[in-house]
Image (spheres, grey):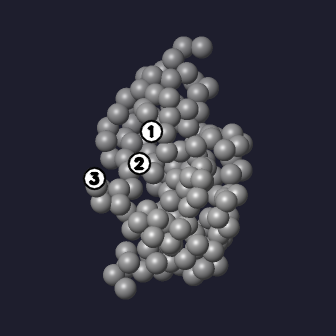
C-alpha cells in the first residue's frame, strides 16, 4: 500500500502527515503527531477512550481512518487548555476528583466539551446519556457528572 499525504487542522493548527490508507486516526494522532491524550482502550469503538471531534462531531478515533482527516478540523484533549490556563472542564475534573487512572479522562473531557457546545445547560440525565459511550472503570460516574455540571455553570457565567 502506498502512503498518502494528508493536510488537516488539529486543535486549530494546520498540519500535514503521511499515513497508510488503513492507519487509524488514533494511530496517526499518537504515533505521527505526538498527541498522546487519546488512548486505545478497546480498538472497537466501545469505550470512548480515544474520543476526538472531527468537524465538530464526536467520534472514536480508533474507528476513523487517518486519510478521512483530509481537509478536516480535528479536536483533541490537547486543544482544551489555553496555554497554562486549564479549560473549566479540566479544572473541575481535578477539583472534584472526577479522575483516577487517566485512561478514560481525555475521551470524557472531549465528549463533555462537545456536549456543552451543543447544550450549555444539560441535566444530569442528558450528561449521563451523552457520556454513555465513555466507560470508566475507576471512578464511577457521580463525580464526573458533578464536575461537568459545575463546569457548565461556570462556562455559562452562572
Q: Position of residue 81 (x, y in %)?
A: 35, 56
Q: Earlier in the sequence, mark 3 or mark 1?
A: 1
Q: Earlier in the sequence, mark 3 or mark 2?
A: 2
Q: How many marks?
A: 3
- From the image, which quarter does the C terminus lie in? bottom left
Badge 1 element:
loop
Measure how far apart labels 3 and 1 are at the Cα level.
16 Å
Which residue sits at x=53%, y=68%? 97
Circles 3, 1 touching at the beta carbon (< 8 Å): no
Res 58 seen here: no
143 left or right, relative to 74 = right
Q: Which residue is mark 2?
A: 78
Q: Position of residue 49 (x, y in %)?
A: 61, 49
Which residue sits at x=66%, y=44%? 41
Q: Position of residue 69 (x, y in %)?
A: 48, 37
Q: Which residue is mark 1?
A: 35
Q: Position of residue 141 (x, y in %)?
A: 65, 69
Q: Nearer the viewer, residue 55 or 120?
A: 120
Which residue sits at x=46%, y=78%? 150
Mark identifier at residue 83? 3
Mark identifier at residue 88? none
Badge 3 element:
loop
> Label 1 neighbourhood size at 10 Å, few (<14), some (14-19), many (20+)?
some
Circles 2, 1 touching at the beta carbon (< 8 Å): yes
144 left or right, relative to 18 = right
Amino acid at each position: 500500500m502506498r502512503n498518502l499525504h494528508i493536510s488537516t487542522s488539529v486543535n486549530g493548527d494546520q498540519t500535514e502527515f503521511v499515513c497508510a490508507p488503513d492507519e487509524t486516526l488514533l494511530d496517526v494522532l499518537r504515533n505521527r503527531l505526538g498527541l498522546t491524550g487519546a488512548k486505545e482502550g478497546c480498538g472497537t469503538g466501545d469505550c470512548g477512550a480515544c474520543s476526538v471531534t472531527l468537524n465538530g462531531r464526536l467520534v472514536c478515533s480508533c474507528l476513523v481512518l487517518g486519510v478521512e482527516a483530509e481537509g478536516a478540523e480535528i479536536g483533541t484533549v490537547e486543544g482544551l487548555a489555553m496555554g497554562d490556563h486549564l479549560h473549566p472542564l479540566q479544572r473541575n475534573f481535578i477539583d472534584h476528583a472526577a479522575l483516577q487512572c487517566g485512561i478514560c479522562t481525555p475521551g470524557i473531557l472531549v465528549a463533555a466539551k462537545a456536549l456543552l457546545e451543543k447544550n450549555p445547560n444539560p441535566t444530569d440525565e442528558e450528561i449521563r446519556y451523552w457520556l454513555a459511550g465513555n466507560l470508566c472503570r475507576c471512578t464511577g460516574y457521580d463525580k464526573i457528572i458533578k464536575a461537568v455540571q459545575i463546569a457548565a455553570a461556570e462556562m455559562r457565567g452562572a
